Image (spheres, grey):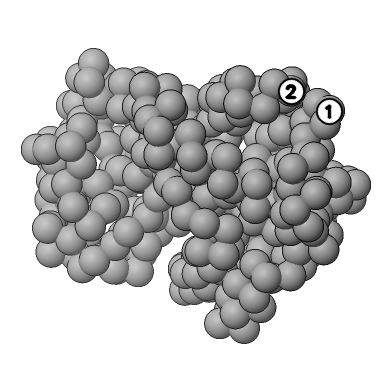
């Protein structure tokens, strides 16, 4: 995994040739954002927020199209095969760096992409059904030794599942069974209905339910407590050790896209974030903005490949 990280990070400097003219000229026509997941998910929500803001900046229409399937792989493969002219952009999640290790054949190679932007992030958190008598993470871990406990997630290979496996199986050595669903909505519904006692969710998918007291937050997977949930401890505060696990939103272009175009996309999106143009929409979506330059964003994806690859291997996770 170390080699994959280094090679992928190196690609940050290897986008196709570009010059100032290409940077000034693009875009000259409509741009398509191809979202690798179904409508209403984090990638789709952020794609539409960013599309509206960049449309206003560029004066060009951005079409948002969903191409869900295979955990984000179908959409990624389609963009990998598209013309490298900057007019087809992949919008995906942490599934992109995860799937490299999760799938034997994801349908694309890392070398086929240049990271255009690391746009947003939302932390993962553990929640419980309101009636569960074990209210803290240490209590839940202790109870798992004598009780059949389980947690729901948005699906196999999502960072919510990986965070759950990291907490329970790797750090706590606890037998808490994973129950995958086909998205965050059915996962949280199962907890509210008492079908599964626990769930790993993102703040963007679970925040409203916590606010409504439909589920109870147990712990967050961040280095510090969240301002949205100041009374909820971090996993590290519960004594398990440091963990940082989030669901991120990325924009990718085909690797041979002129470097000037990729740089312009990155700079234009970051300028909107820096100006506060996306703040209200991002906050409503339960995500935080990120303004990494292109090289830093690509290096971050490389680090995520290594981190989640190690978790997948240690936990023995397989795509079924």
Q: Is residue 242 left or right of residue 75?
A: left
Label 1, label 2: how many angstroms apart (C-alpha)?
6 Å
Residue 312 coordinates in the image, percent (x, y): 52, 66
Q: Which of 254 and 285 is in front in this view?
A: 254
Image: 268 above or below 214: below
Question: Can you see residue 77?
Answer: no
- Asked which quadrant contains residue 57, the reply is top right
The numbered mark at residue 60 is 2
The numbered mark at residue 29 is 1
Residue 14 coordinates in the image, percent (x, y): 74, 70
Q: Which of 73 and 126 is in front in this view?
A: 73
Image: 300 above or below 284: below
Element at label 1: loop
- State if disc 2 and disc 1 touch (CB < 8 Å): yes
Residue at 79% from the left image edge and 59% from the top image edge: 18
Residue at 81% from the left image edge and 26% from the top image edge: 30
Q: Is residue 43 left or right of residue 70?
A: left
Question: Can you see residue 25?
Answer: yes
Query: Badge 1, how many Cα within 10 Å: few under 14, some, many 20+?
Result: few
Residue 102 coordinates in the image, percent (x, y): 63, 62
User: Quick one: quadrant of the N terminus?
Assistant: bottom right
Q: Which of 241 and 252 is in front in this view?
A: 252
């Amino acid at each position: 995994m170390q080699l994959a990280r280094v090679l992928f990070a190196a690609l940050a400097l290897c986008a196709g040739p570009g010059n100032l003219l290409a940077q000034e000229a693009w875009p000259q026509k409509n741009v398509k954002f191809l979202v690798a997941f179904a409508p209403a998910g984090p990638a789709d929500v952020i794609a539409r927020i960013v599309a509206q803001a960049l449309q206003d900046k560029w004066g060009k229409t951005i079409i948002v199209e969903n191409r869900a399937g295979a955990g984000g792989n179908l959409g990624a493969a389609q963009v990998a095969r598209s013309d490298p002219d900057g007019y087809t952009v992949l919008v995906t999640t942490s599934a992109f760096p995860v799937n490299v290790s999760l799938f034997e054949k994801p349908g694309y190679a890392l070398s086929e992409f240049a990271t255009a932007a690391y746009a947003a992030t939302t932390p993962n958190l553990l929640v419980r059904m309101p009636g569960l008598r074990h209210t803290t993470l240490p209590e839940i871990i202790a109870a798992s030794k004598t009780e059949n406990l389980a947690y729901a997630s948005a699906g196999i290979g999502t960072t919510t599942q990986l965070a759950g496996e990291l907490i329970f199986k790797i750090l706590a050595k606890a037998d808490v069974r994973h129950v995958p669903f086909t998205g965050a909505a059915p996962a949280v519904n199962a907890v509210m209905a008492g079908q599964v006692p626990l769930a790993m969710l993102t703040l963007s998918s679970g925040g409203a339910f916590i606010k409504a007291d439909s589920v109870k937050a147990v712990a967050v997977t961040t280095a510090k407590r969240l301002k949205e949930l100041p009374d909820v401890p971090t996993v590290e505060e519960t004594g398990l050790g440091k963990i940082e696990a989030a669901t991120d939103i990325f924009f990718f272009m085909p690797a041979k896209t002129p470097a000037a175009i990729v740089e312009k996309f990155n700079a234009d999106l970051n300028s909107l974030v820096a100006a506060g143009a996306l703040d209200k929409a991002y906050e409503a979506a339960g995500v935080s903005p990120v303004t990494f330059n292109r090289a830093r964003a690509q290096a971050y994806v490389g680090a995520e490949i290594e981190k989640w690859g190690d978790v997948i291997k240690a936990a023995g996770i397989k795509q079924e």
